[in-house]
Image (cartoon, grey):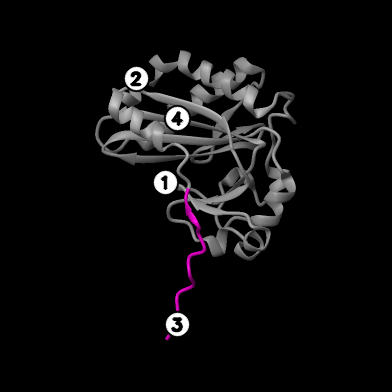
């Protein structure tokens, strides 16, 4: 008889629960942008931590492993990352593909206004510049509500990414087998040297100004 491997995930990634609650209560889109408070690995709702991360190294270094609501492969986040999340009233339970398209365009426009042009959607949900990934995104959908979150690489800990994440078990075609450091880029590398905390307020303001464009999603 085989014994299933224990799930090493310590707990949920739950930083945006207040955002979801506010969207439910107010019936209006809610936007948040903030630096990630600590170093951790975050795995998608259906991901296998033994395949997508290196749990032994995480445990040895005391780095938490968390599970987010949305899908996608594992990422490492740290205070050099900027989290940008939206919670939107949205009729029904579908529309994920269209939502990625609308929100990715808004993110690209907002980043262009801050000085980084050429941010486009690649693969299912990535934000990329010139074929290199700048941010990974996910959507969680429940009846009447859509939650989108992206992790933008501002000035990340590159060594932590290599230490805690193997090559992913699945990848978008544009990655073309490249290792993390050749595939990923950051806002600092793209000429935007501001700290995540400074960028957070500026990005949130840009997205708030674009709230009317969320109408195709929120109805």
- Is residue 18 or residue 209 the one in the foreground? 18
Q: Say which of 18 and 163 sits in front.
A: 18
Looking at the image, how many numbered discs can be counted on the residues? 4
Q: Which residues are magenta?
A: 1-12
The alpha-carbon separation of the residues under discs 1 and 3 comes to 29 Å
Marks 3 and 2: which is nearer the front? 3
- Tell me, for residue 2, which label it has, or none: 3
Element class at badge 1: loop
Tell me the distance, in whole angstroms, between the alpha carbons under discs 4 and 2. 13 Å
Q: Is residue 137 magenta?
A: no
For discs 3 and 4, the disc positioned in front in the rendered view? 3
- Label 3 – label 4 distance at C-alpha: 43 Å
> In terms of depth relative to the viewer, which is nearer, 29 or 18?
18
Q: Which residue is mark 1?
A: 69
Q: Residue at x 44, y 36 (%)?
A: 16
Which numbered disc, 1 or 2, marks the residue closer to the eye?
1
Residue 17 x/y as whole percent: 40, 38
Q: Nearer the viewer, mark 4 or mark 2?
A: 2
Residue furthest bottom as drawn: 1
**Could you tell which of marks 3 and 2 lies nearer the N-terminus?**
3
Q: Which mark is residue 186?
A: none
Task: Return the x and y of residue 43 as percentages of the image width and height.
Answer: 51, 52
Give the distance between the C-alpha atoms of the residues marked 1 and 2, in whole angstroms: 23 Å
The residue under label 4 is 101
């Amino acid at each position: 008889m085989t014994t299933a491997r224990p799930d090493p995930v310590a707990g949920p990634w739950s930083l945006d629960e207040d955002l979801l609650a506010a969207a439910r209560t107010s019936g209006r889109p809610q936007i948040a942008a903030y630096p990630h408070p600590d170093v951790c690995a975050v795995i998608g709702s259906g991901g296998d931590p033994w395949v997508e991360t290196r749990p032994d190294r995480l445990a040895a270094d005391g780095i938490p492993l968390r599970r987010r609501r949305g899908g996608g492969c594992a990422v490492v986040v740290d205070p050099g990352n900027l989290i940008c999340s939206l919670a939107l009233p949205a009729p029904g339970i579908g529309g994920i593909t269209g939502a990625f398209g609308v929100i990715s365009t808004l993110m690209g426009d907002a980043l262009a206004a801050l000085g980084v042009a050429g941010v486009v959607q690649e693969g299912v949900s990535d934000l990329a510049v010139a074929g290199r990934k700048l941010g990974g995104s996910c959507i969680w959908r429940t009846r009447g509500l859509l939650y989108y979150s992206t992790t933008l690489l501002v000035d990340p800990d590159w060594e932590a990414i290599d230490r805690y994440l193997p090559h992913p078990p699945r990848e978008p075609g544009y990655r073309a087998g490249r290792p993390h450091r050749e595939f990923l880029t950051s806002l600092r590398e793209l000429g935007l040297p501001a700290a995540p905390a400074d960028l957070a307020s500026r990005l949130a303001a840009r997205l708030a100004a674009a709230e009317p464009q969320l109408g195709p999603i929120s109805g």
